[in-house]
Amino acid sequence: MQTVASQESETQFLTFMLAGEEYGVDILKVQELRGWENVTPIPSTPSYVRGVINLRGIVIPIVDLRDRFGLEVVQPGPTTVVIILKLESKESKERVMGIVTDAVSEVYTLNQSELRPPPDMEGSATIDFVKDLATIDDKMVILLDIGRLVHEGILGDKEESALAE
Amino acid sequence: MSVDLDQFKGIFFEESFENLEAMEAGLLELSEGEIDLETVNTIFRGAHSIKGGGAAFGYVLVSSFTHVMEELLDQMRNGEREADSMSVNILLESVDVIRGMLEAYQEEEEPDEERPLKLKAQLEAIRDSSDEKPAPSAAGDSVTEPDTDTQNDELTGWGISFVPHVDLLLTGNDPSFLFRELAELGEIQLEPDVSGIPAFAEMVPDHCYLSWNIKINAAIEKEQISEIFEWVEDECDLDIQPVYKKKERRADDRRAEDRRSDDRRSADKSVDRRQGSRRGGGKSKVPAPAATIRVSTDRIDEIIDMVGELVITQSMLSQLGEDLQLEGLDRLREGLDQLERNSRELQEGVMSIRMQPISFAFNRFPRMVHDVSEKLGKQIRLDTKGEDTEMDKMVMEKINDPLVHLVRNSMDHGLEPPEERIEAGKSEEGVVCLSAFHQGSSIVVEISDDGRGLSREKIVAKAVERGLVKESDLLTDEQAFRLLLEPGFSTAEVVSDLSGRGVGLDVVRKNIESLGGSIDIRSVLGEGSTFTIRLPLTLAVLDGQLMRVGEHTFILPLNAIVESLQMSPEFISGVGANTELYRLRDEYIPILRFSDVFNVGERLKNLENALLVVVEWGEKHVGLLVDDLLGQQQVVIKSLETNYKRIRGVSGATILGDGTVSMILDVAGLVELSNVGRETASAKALEHSQAG
């Protein structure tokens, strides 16, 4: 990890735990980490959108990734971490959103050559949001395509995000 | 040292666009036949200040163009010319061209020269076509033309007699700037004339008593000089005389002659040259000015007063806070009350800055109607009502496009051609009416026409074909017309086939809904249609009623509430399994349950003594079933869309005093949802009964 070679192909990932598995997101998309706080539910929304919180005067949605990925939903506890992500949205404004995770794990610097594409699997919706897989200390780390996850998987504007890309 | 004009550019552009609008409005009045001197003057003044400003900022294309326009207007003003439809149309086109040029300059781009030059030639042709008056010299009457016999002599310079009127300085002009600009053209000699200075005791400090004789030793065009003085033309007596040295006639004098005979072209040339020198001067590019708003100083003064009061309250409170004792409690409460009043007043004051009369949006329509009616060969009259209705500038900017769309639709598809109208026994002239008024916390804008109206059968047939509704569905007229606003409807083939409407109305609807508004359609076949847009007054703050439903706290806009009451069982009646009505005096009001609409809270079995909040949207009343009414407070609207997406029935969120987030309800959306909710609820009930 100390190697400075080929800066461009290296990416830093923040990883977090979700039901025993380690997931990673591009660290440049992470704005901050917070503990769990009570949310205000939004009516007529899927259950994985837990609600909204007041983040220093702005209202941001909090998404339960366990619920979104079809894992067993647990009540947030003291180790629960909310990762606040900042994403480019289609109106070129930033979109801020929080994801609920079991715990935050590590920061890895990964070279492009260490990344493997996910296998092609029909009928698995969740795998669509996986960008790459990496192996670190013999353990699989799932690197998420967070833009796609948010726009298609959470906001559900598939067509519009396809246009933006 | 040079004056930094850039900071005034923004103001110039804004004023010019306003002037153009005024000119347009004036020209449209002219086109109706009568020449009103005041109207011509208004147009003239607009052109004049654009010309002056354009010259000051070096936009010579604009100033030379406006100059010709001004001359034509001058002829009209002096009664030498009729305002026939041809000249009015050309002048209208000129307004467009000037607008185009200014927009280009505003973007720091060079405007396209072709169209202005062509149109300018047309304007000149009209100007010169008058036989009552020989073609006037473009340079204006205050400047005398050189004698023809001196054309054989070599031009060495110019003598300028510049006698400012006493109030020159009051108009913001400074002779020294003019001299400095002159000096850029060549060596100048200034000879001040101090004879006009009165005795010291009679002197007024801001009057100008000096006059000057200026000699400039450069063989330049006269227009280059007069251009510098263009801005002060009306505030001084100016005389520009050429200085010649006798010499033999040379071949290139012919060119000089040509130049003089066609001073317009030479003005252009000199313009280009000047521009070149300006650019060459290494002037740094300035970013386009930010959007601005004009506010009367009275409003600003009011706000400053309010801030003053706020500061006083604040200091009183901090003094109390330093040494807080129990006996100070009353004063503390008093101070807090005062603080609340202050901040509310201040907030209202600041909000009022954003409010502008809707005439800003309406003003563009006469022109559009004028153009479109000609193009379509229909006679159309535009009526506007309630132009003084004020609305938030931001909302106004955003509804501009939808309005244009709807008005265009009305003219294009709503109104019939003249023959058809006569056949239908209507007057030949179709009427499109734009009106605006306030209703509760919303502003209503209506676009109506007396055209052929909408055919319900055709719309429904088309919708069935598109799979938007089923044939068996029973739709009210209103619901049927609303189908036009569905995305599936917006295809061109629908238009030709149906009685018009339908193109992009879903976009209109989307735009309006994104502002938290709604749109309704009313229509009577053969008599016309009305599109009603309802928008919140402001996008930022509202007075809210907090209420509890289950574990949730919702906020309802206070002015949507008609009344709240405890239901008496004898007035509740059910229609079918899941539609409940409450009789309020002589009206039956549908009861809306949040448990159905939002799936929150428990579905109460017994409605006796339950709380009903009656809300109003348009002419409709609906009762919301709530568990408890909490306090009332002002809330700042935060968009849910910024970070998430729009939710039906929710217009936004807000942050309460304790830092938690609460949802603000959107009455229009709720009413719509209640219909859907009832359907799913009845479906569920059906399942239950079958299971049971």
Image: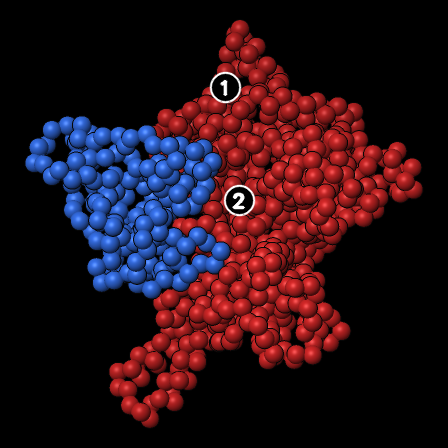
According to the image, label 1 marks what residue? Answer: B155
Image location of residue A86, percent across then percent down: 32, 46
B513 vs A83, nearest the viewer:
A83
Q: Is residue B541 left or right of residue A152?
A: right
* Rendered view: A24 above or below A163: below
B398 vs A151, nearest the viewer:
A151
Can the viewer see residue B169 in this picture?
A: no
According to the image, label 2 marks what residue? Answer: B14
The residue that appears at 47% across and 59% down in the rendered structure is A43
Image location of residue B248, percent across then percent down: 52, 8
* 1 or 2: mark nearer the eye: 2
Q: CA distance from mark 1 to mark 2?
A: 41 Å
Chain that appears blue: A
* Rendered view: B682 above or below B552: above
Chain letter belonging to callout 1: B
Which residue is outermost to the bottom? B327
Three-letter amino acid code of the residue under disc 1: Leu
**Label 2's element?**
helix
The residue that appears at 29% across and 90% down in the rendered structure is B325
Chain letter belonging to callout 2: B
Image location of residue A60, percent across then percent down: 37, 55
The residue that appears at 60% across and 23% down in the rendered structure is B115
Q: Is residue A93 left or right of residue B461?
A: left
Q: Are marks 1 and 2 in contact (CB under 8 Å)?
A: no
Query: Chain B takes which shade in the image?
Result: red
The residue that appears at 26% across and 30% down in the rendered structure is A117
Q: Residues within 10 Å of mark 2 (few under 14, many from 20)?
A: some
Tag 2 or tag 1, which sits nearer the N-term? 2
Q: Quadrant of the C terminus of chain B?
A: bottom right
Image location of residue B503, percent across then percent down: 66, 36
